[in-house]
Amino acid sequence: MFKHFCRGGGRLKLPIDEPALAPASRKQKKRLRNVKRLSVLVVAVTIMATGFMATKSSSLAGALRQSSWDGTVTHAQLQNLSLPPPQESRNVGGTRRFRVFMAADAPNLSLCKSVMSSVALGYPLPILLNWKGEFNRPEWHLAGSHIAKLESLHAAIEALLADPNDIAHDDDLAVLVDSYDVWFQLPPSVLIQRYHQINKDADRRIRDQWRETWRGRGDDDDDDFPIPPPKQNIVVTSAKDCHPGPESGSHPHYDHWPQSPMPKFMYGPGTDKVSGPLFDPARKYKKVRPRCVNSGMIMGTMGALRAALARSKDKIAEAERTGRQLWSDQALLGEVIGEQELWREWVRHLGATWDGDDDDTAGAPLYGGLHRDVVPIARAALREGKNFEFGIGLDYAFSTIPPTCSAEEDGDFVALSDHEQVEAASERAGVVDGVRVRGVPPELLLHTTPNAARDAITYRDPLRDIAWGEVPLYTDFFFGTTPVGIHHNAYVDGLKAWRIDNWWERMWFHRHLRRLVSSHLILPQQTGSGGVRPIVRVANVSSDGVEVVYVPPASESQEKVVTVFEPARRGAAGEEAVFEPISFDGICQRGKKPWFEELFGDKIGPLAL
């Protein structure tokens, strides 16, 4: 377009065929001066705004100012990232309460079965959440009822911990289970022991990961790195399929989650391969080791749950502010866990490059070599002081209340002492290397401490005469595990509804149900020596080495009844949350046929104590 530039004489030749510009008029000159002034003003405002934002976003004593920060993280900054456990957590031996929560909004025989299975086995009477739909959002998909499950649990825990009568503590244990499709089959002592064992195993794996980091930089000593390996306090059931994803409004970042610690040959040569016909989505994941989240059971200390659920609540509020919707509690919880895993990934990266100096000038590179998903987490942790570590992990071994979807044919009811029956069932399931079931779970046979042995003599236990090896227990033959409960979410060929209708009579306790329920509801469950019968005693889990004794909530020493959590109304001055009793008729009766006829099937009539 341009023929040439002529520098001689100070003139610039214009493009060919374009006329020379006429001299600027007075009006044009004035307009040009105004444009220049405006440009200067915009630049000045931009510089001031940039400086303000840089100052505002800086934290940790100004170490991250944009103008001077060199991209390293110092010892002092890492110490600020090394967050202590919740302030009220003692983690010492002694008495701790155990509570059961279920989210339910209407009476139903399925809810009745879930509740009665827990009562028959000696669990504390459950607390029902969102019973009147107080936490629902009608304009959201599914009325926001799934999201309400997490919000209502957070509100209930907050109310209990804030009670002036000191009825709850951060170290108390709580479990939330799905209310319409979960049945318990083993007593609470087994669930609590497995919870602690899962956490111990996870702590060991995480500690090994941290040490691998030190070895990667030629250092076997991890004491100099300010951030210690996290400890697990929350256990969530795991899933084979990573669903749902970002389409739910939440992003779990599953690509950054750990691989399953279960054997790599668990399902034979096709382990971890997604296969099967496209029209059968459940069986596609049949041979996948679980490593994603299923929110059918969430269990942890009250303090740890409060912190993790508060983060979920913040995400719900952010979605509302931006006009988005969240429809999956599972994906929302998965996003909290996913950000935790991104944070751990970043911290391990820092540990691998840490030089060990204590002065404020030594440090590790912040972003070099990091995945792009990790960078926002690192920035938020350093600049805003956000905490992403909540001590959440998964039940990889299907030992608590695992889902049955994508595992529809993997388990069945067997008498664990009948080796021939177990062997035949394992073969039918397709286990590749023989029987993996090792008889009756040890948690059912052994007294956990010497004091537990004395409890068996002192207190009346309605389950004391159960021959656990001879009753039919649902068992997963690939994991070789008899889980604490069954989560009926198997959807192949409509199995979920069919099993809820037809498997109730197969539960080992069904023929004893009325007697077991009545026995556990009778007050008091104590002897002349006084004291409520402990649920379980656990050794070697407290920081001081003293055994931990789990007992029901104090209210059960006065009345054993299902309660409904009713939150304080927003804006109602002086009003407090309450836990209102509800009858079995109130949670079980729906339709004309009496609930007790369908539930017990013994033609004796209503439940009478």
Image: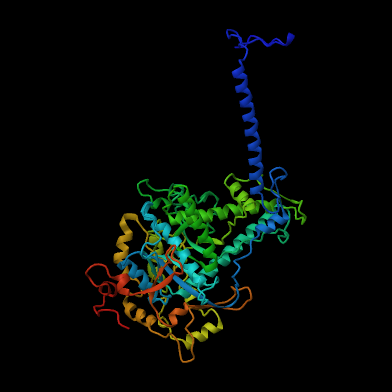
Location of residue 465 (image quadrant): bottom left
In the picture as drawn, the residue positioned furthest to the top comes out as: 17
The image quadrant where one finds the N terminus is: top right
Residue 532, position in %: x, y?
A: 47, 84
In the picture as drawn, the residue positioned furthest to the bottom comes out as: 528
Location of residue 54 (image quadrant): top right
Q: Nearer the viewer, residue 168 or 233?
A: 168
46 sits left or right of 70 in the view: left
Residue 310, position in %: x, y?
A: 52, 60
Residue 104, position in %: x, y?
A: 37, 65
**What residue is at 32 percent from the left and 79 percent from the top?**
514
Q: Nearer the viewer, residue 407 or 435?
A: 407
58 sits left or right of 301 in the view: right
In the picture as drawn, the residue positioned furthest to the left comes out as: 592
Residue 218, position in %: x, y?
A: 73, 53
Look at the image and name its color scheme: rainbow
The image quadrant where one finds the C terminus is: bottom left
Total label count? 0
Location of residue 389 (image quadrant): bottom right
